[in-house]
Amino acid sequence: MPDPSFDTGAPNWIDLGTPDLDAATEFYGGLFGWELVPGGPETGGYGTYQLGGRTVAGVMTVPREQGKPAWTVYFQTPDADATARTVERAGGTAAFAPMDVLDYGRMGGFTDSTGAYFGVWQPGTNPGLGVVMESGSLIWSELYTPDVPATAAFFHTVFGWQTQEMTYPSGPYTTVRPAGGEREGSAFGALVRIDQVPVQAAVGPHWLPYFAVDDADTAAASVTRLGGEVTMDATDVPEVGRIATFADPAGAVFAVIKPAPMG
């Protein structure tokens, strides 16, 4: 699971690009209890979602003609510019070059070698998310990709990720952890062959963030009530938990999990 110490290569930020900020805030506020802290002119209107006074995500208005509604996962880097050079050498591309965000940090946006978009965050005064692994916050991320071995090689080059293949009834599942992440619980996500899950294949290569919840079935009912779409009903995964996948009212995809009891 994600570690709040934010090792290099681990998720340390997440944000939502949406065409309707008010509608998104009503949806995620109703679902998770998030509260919007609007961004000022100096941030270009980029705001944050807070839960109990701690940051759970960033959010910005992105008109549909500029990009489809989507969640973006960002990974910790000590040097965004060096990471950008490594991405290009590994066969990825820069959607936008690293740039300073006031004194908060330095960020860049990229696509991997199979076309999935991701970001990097080099912390300044903002170290990253204020809470992870608690109800209503980021707990896991999956990358849906057409080529798991190629993607694993790409991210090993970029971040030094280590992988471990597991097998579930739905097919192989390759977990990822930071370089040197041998300690228990250091895995933060997985690579999944995109054709294993048709509803995710329809989106194309992408990262799917998971948020922790106390009850996946209740979350699914809330998504429907709030105008979102349940793309996979709540389902038990042995020794993992109960999961469900959704699209918000604008179409951004995400998932929730009620983790299985530990030990």
Image (cartoon, helix red, strand yellow):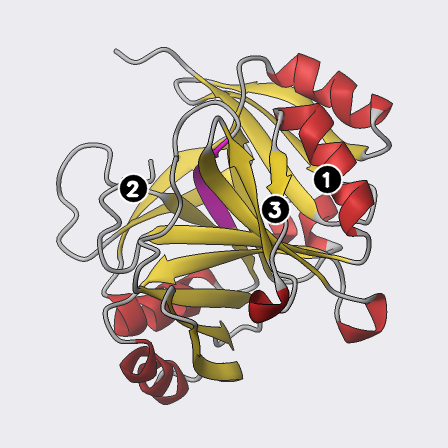
Residue 111 seen anywhere in this rendered image of the structure: no
Helix, strand or loop for disc 3: helix
The amino acid at mark 1 is: Thr
Disc on the earlier residue, 1 or 2? 1
Q: Is residue 12 left or right of residue 53?
A: left
Which of label 2 and label 3 is nearer to you?
2
Magenta stretch: dominant SS? strand
Q: Which residues are magenta?
A: 137-142
Q: Which mark is residue 231?
A: none
**Label 2: few (<14), some (14–19) or many (≥20) C-alpha neighbours in 10 Å:** many
For the residues labelled 3 and 1, the Cα–Cα distance comes to 32 Å
Where residue 97 appears, x then y in whole percent?
Answer: 47, 85
Where residue 130 appears, x then y in whole percent?
Answer: 38, 40
Depicted 149 relative to depicted 219: above or below: below
Q: Quadrant of residue 238?
A: top left
Q: Is residue 239 magenta?
A: no
Disc on the earlier residue, 3 or 1? 1
Where residue 153 appears, x then y in whole percent?
Answer: 33, 69
Q: Quadrant of residue 207?
A: bottom right
The amino acid at mark 2 is: Ala
- Which residue is disc 3 drawn over? 196
- Which residue is disc 1 drawn over? 25
Quadrant holding the C terminus:
top left
Residue at image position (61%, 46%) is 196
The amino acid at mark 3 is: Gln
Depicted 168 relative to depicted 116: above or below: above
- Which residue is disc 2 drawn over? 187
Helix, strand or loop for disc 1: helix
Give the camera-side residue of 195 and 233: 233
Quadrant holding the N terminus:
top left
